[in-house]
């Protein structure tokens, strides 16, 4: 008697699944879901929208001179002439396309690391359910383009290291140039990554030097062409870069003194001359401080990746061993990870803070190690049903966590905006501490420079001004409450007690 096995075959299933087009479709769908749930934009969005408005009225030079490295806004403004709706719609369409490109680039990178259907399937799950990026899908930020083109450049670099084709070098250079147009951090990848080709032990030294020379030569030619075109257009890119990094460059120049001062603070905090006579040694303080910053970076990375995914990656690594990657792809991925980590460490040293958003590129690069690790882990499991049970639970958890909003209602802000549009005549001087109210009320021209402190905004008002103030439930505004010159006109409250208060300064 013959029996038929009905065991589910993930390899066959993944091979038949149109993973790339399906993932791109789901990425766009996820963007739509998140955008519809979040009508209020992130604060940074309004600077990009204002720059796009300036481009439409005064041209690109006015944007670059007034706002700095805002090519993102120029692209939004250009798209606004094609896409029905306003600038916000054009920006959301653009960001949705960038997230789709990011999804595609991640899948292509995964294919270069390990070209198996199962690894592709796991890669699609990883990039689609990552809360870090899903929760930012409604943000209007230029970072998305930086992430997408940086990872795409890595794909082209891997292909170049394998083939040595000049067109691959050109594709890498172009992708990084586009990434630089979004964020200048891509310049570090341009400057440092090509030299890592010299460290490839799989190639003879002569071939390494030739490949490195090709990459640097093509990149230099492209950069020279861009500089010439910009000069012909009357735009100085070096000056623009200096303006865009005006907060960072002075601190970078003062890095030796900063490290020396930091070393002194560390030594004074940890040691005394009585218990450690060498506490005045600068090198010891620098080493301790850098170790602390590196540890903070790792913890931030784990938080950005999410603790469950970080634990899965570590446990797969410990139980199965380091995942086998295509050699050239693995080397280039490690080079990108090293440069991204160095850039973050440098940033946190000079700026003394770090957010998950700034760590996203490094997070995505580390995440690229997870699909082959899961592939190895699946190949060794004795109980596939239990594996899929845990996998299904995690996917469900991450989809709900990243696509469903559990925050408090923002209806009080929406009601405040509606009141301002309906009740205030044109030309009314409005002062507010909320970017969305400033933008959508239609009464604040320079809405992108809105100050968030409610009391400071109230203190700067004059007779005749209308104040529309957002007040969190746990904040007091004693200056406003005790000021007899402020006549309350309306108040809107959400379920937590957050308020939008509207006053007229008499």
Image (tube, rainbow, N blue to C red):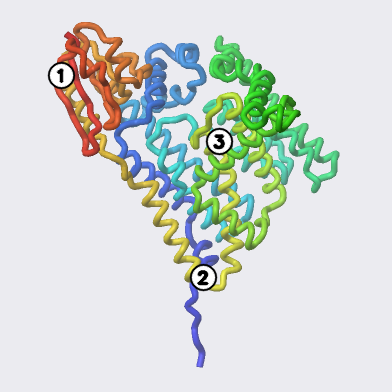
Q: Residue furthest bottom?
A: 1
Give above or below for 374 relative to 435.
Answer: below
Q: Nearer the viewer, residue 353 or 11?
A: 353
**Relative to residue 307, is residue 451 drawn left or right?**
left
Q: Which mark is residue 258?
A: none
**Relative to residue 117, is residue 400 drawn left or right?**
left
Callout 2 touching callout 3 (CB < 8 Å): no
The residue drawn where x is 27% and y is 26% is 471
**Relative to residue 497, is residue 367 drawn left or right?**
right
Q: CA distance from mark 2 to mark 3?
A: 36 Å
Q: Which residue is mark 3?
A: 149
Where is residue 459? Give x, y as percent.
29, 11
Quadrant position of residue 216: top right
Q: Secondary structure at mark 2?
A: helix
Instruction: Choose mark 2 or mark 3, whichever is in front.
Output: 2
The residue drawn where x is 30% and y is 20% is 454
Where is residue 150? Give x, y as percent.
58, 36
Question: Quarter of the image containing the C terminus?
Answer: top left
The residue drawn where x is 25% and y is 32% is 498
Give above or below for 366 relative to 13.
Answer: above
**Relative to residue 22, is residue 207 drawn left or right?**
right
Q: Which residue is mark 1?
A: 488
Q: CA distance from mark 2 to mark 1?
A: 64 Å
Q: Which residue is mark 2?
A: 384
Give above or below for 484 relative to 126.
Answer: above
């Amino acid at each position: 008697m013959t029996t038929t096995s009905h065991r589910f075959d993930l390899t066959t299933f993944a091979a038949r699944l149109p993973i790339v087009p399906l993932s791109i479709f789901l990425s766009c769908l996820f963007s739509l879901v998140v955008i519809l749930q979040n009508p209020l934009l992130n604060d940074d969005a309004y600077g990009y929208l204002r720059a796009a408005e300036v481009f439409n009225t005064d041209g690109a030079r006015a944007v670059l001179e007034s706002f700095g490295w805002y090519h993102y806004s120029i692209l939004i403004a250009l798209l606004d002439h094609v896409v029905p709706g306003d600038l916000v719609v054009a920006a959301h369409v653009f960001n949705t396309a960038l997230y789709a490109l990011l999804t595609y680039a991640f899948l292509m990178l995964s294919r270069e690391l390990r070209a198996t259907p199962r690894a592709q399937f796991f890669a699609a799950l990883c990039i689609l359910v990552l809360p870090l990026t899903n929760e930012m899908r409604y943000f209007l930020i230029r970072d998305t383009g930086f992430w997408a083109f940086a990872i795409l450049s890595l794909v082209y670099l891997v292909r170049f290291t394998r083939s040595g084709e000049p067109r691959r070098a050109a594709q890498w250079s172009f992708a990084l140039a586009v990434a630089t147009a979004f964020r200048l951090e891509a310049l570090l990848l341009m400057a440092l990554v090509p030299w890592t080709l010299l460290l490839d032990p799989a190639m003879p030294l002569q071939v390494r030097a030739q490949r490195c020379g090709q990459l640097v030569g093509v990149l230099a030619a492209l950069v020279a062409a861009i500089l010439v075109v910009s000069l012909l257009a009357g735009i100085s890119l070096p000056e623009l870069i200096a303006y865009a990094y005006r907060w960072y460059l002075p601190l970078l120049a003062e890095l030796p003194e900063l490290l020396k001062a930091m070393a002194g603070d560390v030594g004074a905090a940890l040691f005394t001359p009585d218990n450690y006579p060498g506490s005045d040694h600068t090198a010891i303080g620098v080493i301790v401080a850098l170790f602390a910053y590196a540890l903070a970076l790792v913890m931030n990375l784990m938080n950005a990746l999410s603790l469950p995914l970080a634990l899965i990656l570590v446990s797969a690594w410990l139980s199965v061993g380091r995942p086998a990657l295509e050699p050239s792809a693995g080397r280039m991925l490690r080079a990108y990870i090293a440069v991204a980590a160095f850039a973050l460490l440098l940033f946190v040293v000079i700026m003394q803070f770090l957010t998950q958003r700034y760590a996203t590129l490094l997070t995505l690069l580390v995440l690229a190690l997870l699909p082959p690790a899961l592939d190895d882990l699946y190949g060794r499991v004795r109980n596939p049903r239990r594996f899929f049970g845990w996998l299904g639970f995690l996917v469900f958890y991450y989809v709900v966590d990243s696509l469903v909003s559990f925050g408090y209602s923002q209806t009080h802000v929406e009601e405040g905006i509606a009141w301002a549009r309906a009740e205030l005549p044109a030309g009314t001087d409005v002062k507010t501490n909320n970017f969305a109210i400033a933008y959508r009320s239609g009464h604040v021209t320079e809405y992108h420079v809105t100050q968030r402190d409610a009391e400071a905004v109230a203190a700067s008002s004059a007779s005749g001004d209308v104040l529309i103030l957002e007040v969190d439930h746990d904040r007091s505004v004693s200056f406003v409450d005790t000021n007899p010159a402020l006549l309350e006109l309306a108040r809107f409250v959400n379920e937590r007690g957050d308020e939008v208060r509207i006053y007229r300064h008499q």
